[in-house]
Every structure is written in C-alpha cells, then in structure tokens.
Image (cartoon, coloured by chain):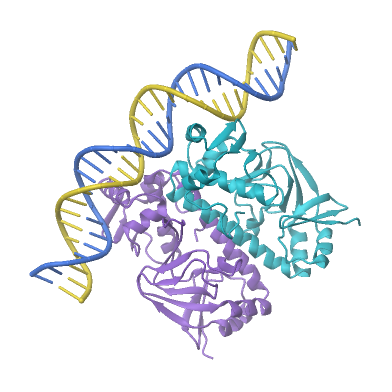
Chain colours: A purple, B cyan, C blue, D yellow
Amino acid sequence: MSRQTIQESNCVAISCQNCGLYQLCLPMGLDSVDTVLLDRYVKRKRLFKRGQVLYRAGEEFTFVFAIRSGSIKTHISTNDGRLQITGFHIPGELIGLNAIDEKRYNGEATALETTSVCEISLDCFEELARQVPSVHYQMLRMMSKEIKHNQGLMLLLGKKKAEERLATYLLSLSRRFAMRNYSPTQFNLSMSRGDIGNYLGIAEETVCRIFTRFQEEGVIVTDRRHIILKDIERLSAIAREPYPIPHSKQQ
Amino acid sequence: MSRQTIQESNCVAISCQNCGLYQLCLPMGLDSVDTVLLDRYVKRKRLFKRGQVLYRAGEEFTFVFAIRSGSIKTHISTNDGRLQITGFHIPGELIGLNAIDEKRYNGEATALETTSVCEISLDCFEELARQVPSVHYQMLRMMSKEIKHNQGLMLLLGKKKAEERLATYLLSLSRRFAMRNYSPTQFNLSMSRGDIGNYLGIAEETVCRIFTRFQEEGVIVTDRRHIILKDIERLSAIAREPYPIPHSKQQ
DNA sequence: CGCCCTGTTGAATCTGGTCAAACTAAGTGG
DNA sequence: CCACTTAGTTTGACCAGATTCAACAGGGCG
C-alpha cells in the first residue's frame, strides 16, 4: 500500500490504494498509527459536477464525504420550499457527519463546481471508531466546530446589517484562504451572488449593490467572480470585528 | 443508595444520594445497568436565581448542566456586545456540552427564573464515557440534536417574516409542552418579550404588535406572560408548517 | 451568432426598526 | 399602607434599509 503523509494547514493528507491522494480533515489527535488504520476505511472516490447533489434531506445516511477539490454548499429548506444555505465547504473539509443521530441526512449538499470527494461509509467509520478511540473524540470535535460555525451564522442572521454581513463574509473567506496558504486578499468565489445572498439572509440584488458601494469606496475590486480586497482595515471596521480573529478559527 | 426510575417523556428520571430526584435527558439507549453507573457521576445540585449566569463564553469548561426545574436561556454575542439568544431550555435538557471541543464554553447561559440544576463535572463525564460506551453515542446524538435545532433557527432567521417567526415559535413551544404532558394550548412564558424578539431576530416592539394583531384576529389570547392558543390551525397556516410536525421533534 | 444564465442598476414599495411616551404590575422602603 | 421606583409591556409616529419588480448588460457556450 503506497502511502505518504503531507501536512497542509491542520489537515492530514493521506494517499491510499482506493482513492489516491486526498485530504481528511481529522485535525490532529491522530498519530501515525491512526493514519495507517485510516487508510483501510476510505472508500470510493467520486466526482460531482456543478449543481449535482451529494445527498438529500431524509435520505439514508450512508457516507461521510471528504472534499478533495472543488467546493460544496450545504443547505436546508422549509417545507414550503424556501431554502437556506448553511455553509460553503472547501477541500479538506468533511460533510454529512451530523446525520449520525437519526441515520438520515438532515439537509442537502450540492456541488458548486466540479468537485472530487472521497466517500467514507458509515460502517467503516464506526468500525474505525471502535479500533481507534480518538476517532470518537474527533467526531465530537467536528460537530462542535459545526455548532460554532452555525452560531456565528445565527449571530449574523439575527443581528447584523446587510453591509456588515457581507464584510464579515469576505473576511471569513479571506481567513479560510489564508489558512490554506492561498492569497487572503485576492480569490475567486465559487458561489453565485444569489448563493451569497441566500447564505447571508439578504437579496441577491442587495449583494450586488453593496459590492458596488464597497468598490466605489475603494474597499474591494470585483470582476464577476474574482475579487480583490483592497482595504482589509476598513472591511474589518465595517464588519465590526478585528482581523484576523484572535484564536477562534472559522470552520 | 435509594433509587427509583420514572419515565417522563423520553427522559430517565433518577434519584441519587447526591442530588435527590433529577432528570437526565440521555434519551434512552441506557439500560438499567447504565443508570446505576450514572448515579456515581452526578455531582452538586445548584440553584440559580433569575438573571444569574451559569457560565460565560471563554470560561473553562468544567460542568455540563442538567436542568431540574426552571428555565435557562443560552446566548452568544458579537465582539461589540450585541447578543443573540440561541435557545431556551427547560427541565430534562442538558446544556454546555458543545464546549467539549475547546474545553471552553463558547456562549453564555443565564437563568430566566429560579432554576435548579445538577452539575456534572467533565472529568466524571469522561470517566462515565469510558465505562459506558453508549454515553459517547449519546453525546453525539445530543450534539446532532443541537445542530438540528440551530438549523431550524437559521432557516427562521434567514428566510421567514416576522409573523411567521412568531407563529413558528408559539407552535414549537406548544409542542415542547405537549411532549411533557403540559397543556399545549395554554402556558406561561418564562422569557420576556425582549428575549423572544432577540431569539427570533426581530424587535421587542414587533413582538408586541404581532401579539396584539394575533389577538385581534382571535388566534391567541395573551395576558402578560400567560398565553392561550385559540386557533392552532390558523397559527400553523401563518407559520406555514403542519401541526404537529410529523416525526421530527424540536429539541 | 444568438441564447441563456448571471450579474447589475433603477424605481417603487413596504416591512420592520427606532425613538418616544404612556401604562401596568410588582416590588421596595419609609 | 402608601409613595416611589423599576422592569416589562404596549402603542403611535416616523423613516431607513432592504425587498420586489422590471429592465438591461455582458460572458460563456452550444
């Protein structure tokens, strides 16, 4: 079994027979023995195209997905069809874990672009957890992280003004890119204006308007999905939060 | 050690030497052997008066709290002081568990009225988890439940109109009371209008106005903190959701 | 080349927030 | 027991921010 481990941010990267190189974000706590074991339980690699659905609400919980490349949005919806995006996920992140309770996914996940994932079957995951005790703890950590992310979003949805929401959003993206050694001031958005607005609880048009206002004020420069943050200071002031955040990383 | 188990909704009620009768909401999965073990790990009983704080954000995670009587609100806040209530908790519920990741509470909890809780120390909890494997699973279940509750709130904060939010809220309260064999159509609110508004992401004044409108339309009758739901049908229509919810109980 | 999707801008509208004030119930202390 | 304080609730007037509706521009792709 060919194997190499690479450190990238706080992720363990592992290659294995089944799916080649992929990143599994069980952030630390796993020593080398653990990672060897991990190899056995990684299953199929799969590719999703833009708009394709990884799982739907209510479907039987069969896999956890580790994102290798591309990006995913997760969302939930009211029974009359309105939907709320709850997160955008990038390589190194794991999604679907919160279905563990009811054994059914409680939301949907859709690819924002061509996206490669590793499916980890529930059975394997549980078997792994039996053999490697720290996996249980990692699961708790990951769910706790999700709770924290959701709390941040609730605060934003419940208490912030549209401008503040967008500034907060841009800074949070910036931080996530920085953590992965990408440029924190210049990046491409894989999601549409509509998706951003949906996620932040504001209308698509409001997103556009505020982007243009930011641009007029020299805070950012946008060209369709490409964006440059020109004035992080000012953006932080608008978002009313320091940059970077002291010691609480976004998910 | 005197011990008696009582079924109430889906909670195991246990009395033990340390804290007398209390309800620990590890919903099932624990057989009688487990509950015997459980007794050992329950620690101090404590009383909090209205407005008193159980824990603050950033404080070291020492206890999980099981509510015996009264009620608690949990909240988080922006770094410039605005706060968002994330949940109201009633007897039988457990709070503080999501601090397990960073070993620090990531939000605050405040008593809404005189409230009695059992403190369960982290050490004891971990020791318990070692001895009783199902506890780990229960912890995952509970965090998953919290995630689901938060998702509901995000959907509400991001996509619903003020009227809809209040109707949804009243129905959710009604369901929770019903689960505990209290009247689902007539109850006392332990939280202020301000708290309700904060939780739902609308102004206190808006809560009042909509309550009066509901009253004018004959949907409810209110007298300060006491409320009677007169027309559940109509309330469900306003909330745009069926009553009761098919098979997904609110937390 | 022409269509479609996404993004942008403008104008009208409206929901809900803010501010101010009155009112009520429940304490609190003399 | 009453005057006074305080916290919570309710209502009104005003208006700002955001939504909605509508039209249009520009890329990307068949």
Residue shown at 41% from the left, 63% from the top: A177
Q: Position of residue B204 (x, y in %)?
A: 51, 34
Residue shown at 60% from the left, 62% from the top: B144
Q: Which is nearer the eye, B166 or A15?
A: B166
Using the rendered image of the protein, determine whether residue B76 is visible from the camera's viewpoint.
no
Using the image, determine if residue A9 lies above or below residue B114. Answer: below
Q: Quadrant of the C terminus of chain B?
A: bottom right
Would you say A154 lies left or right of D7 here? Answer: left
Q: Which is nearer the eye, B145 or B231?
A: B231
Q: Which is nearer the eye, B219 or A85?
A: B219
Using the image, determine if residue A112 lies above or below residue A199. Answer: below
Picture quadrant of residue B195? top right
Residue shown at 47% from the left, 47% from the top: B237
Q: Which is nearer the eye, B55 or B137?
A: B137
Picture quadrant of residue B249? bottom right
Would you say B92 lies left or right of A238 here? Answer: right
Using the rendered image of the protein, determine whether residue A126 is visible from the camera's viewpoint.
yes
